[in-house]
Image: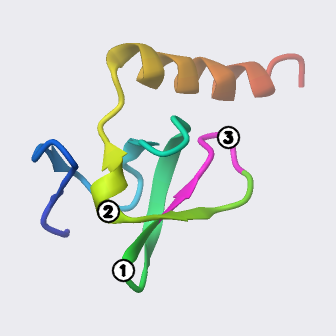
Amino acid sequence: MTVPAPDADGHAVSADAGALVVDRRSGKVGVVMGRAGPYVQLRPPGGGLEWDVPPGDVRPPTRAEELGAKVAVANRGWGR
């Protein structure tokens, strides 16, 4: 387990693998996959290409953002 990194507002944001966070720069929701050097690596909740984000540019998702990400993942599996 890692110590939560403070975001730009000074709030603690979990950078642990599996945590759901938002990239402040793009507004995209991502799942923390790990760290690469000074960056947090995020991946879209349903899978896809990872991208790097400075730890200060991630924040916790709002309830609406979290729910939206979970619904999007569930909808991808619909009808399979």
Say which quadrant the C terminus sits in.
top right
Q: Secondary structure at mark 2?
A: helix
Identify the magenta region: 41-47
Q: Position of residue 35 (x, y in %)?
A: 41, 75
Q: With 12 as the anchor, is 44 left or right in this view?
A: right
Q: Secondary structure at mark 3?
A: loop
Q: With 44 as the anchor, is 14 left or right in this view?
A: left
Dot 1 amino acid type: Pro
Quadrant hosting residue 39: bottom left
- The Cα–Cα distance between marks 1 and 2, rounded to whole angstroms, is 8 Å
Q: Residues within 10 Å of mark 3 (few under 14, many from 20)?
A: some
Q: Residue at x 70, y 49 (%)?
A: 47
Which residue is the site of mark 3?
Answer: 46
Q: Secondary structure at mark 1?
A: loop
Queried whether the magenta region covers residue 44, the answer comes back as yes
Labels 1 and 2 touching (C-beta < 8 A): yes
Dot 3 amino acid type: Gly
- The Cα–Cα distance between marks 3 and 1, rounded to whole angstroms, is 25 Å
Q: Residue at x 66, y 23 (%)?
A: 72
Q: Earlier in the sequence, mark 3 or mark 1?
A: 1
Q: With 48 as the anchor, is 35 left or right in this view?
A: left
Residue 55 badge: 2
Q: Residue at x 16, y 59 (%)?
A: 4
Q: Residues within 10 Å of mark 2 (few under 14, many from 20)?
A: many
Dot 2 amino acid type: Pro
Residue 38 badge: 1
Residue 24, relative to residue 42: is it above or below? above
Residue 19, relative to residue 68: is it above or below? below
Say which quadrant the N terminus sits in.
bottom left
Q: Residues within 10 Å of mark 1 (few under 14, many from 20)?
A: few
Is any part of residue 77 visible from this angle?
Answer: no
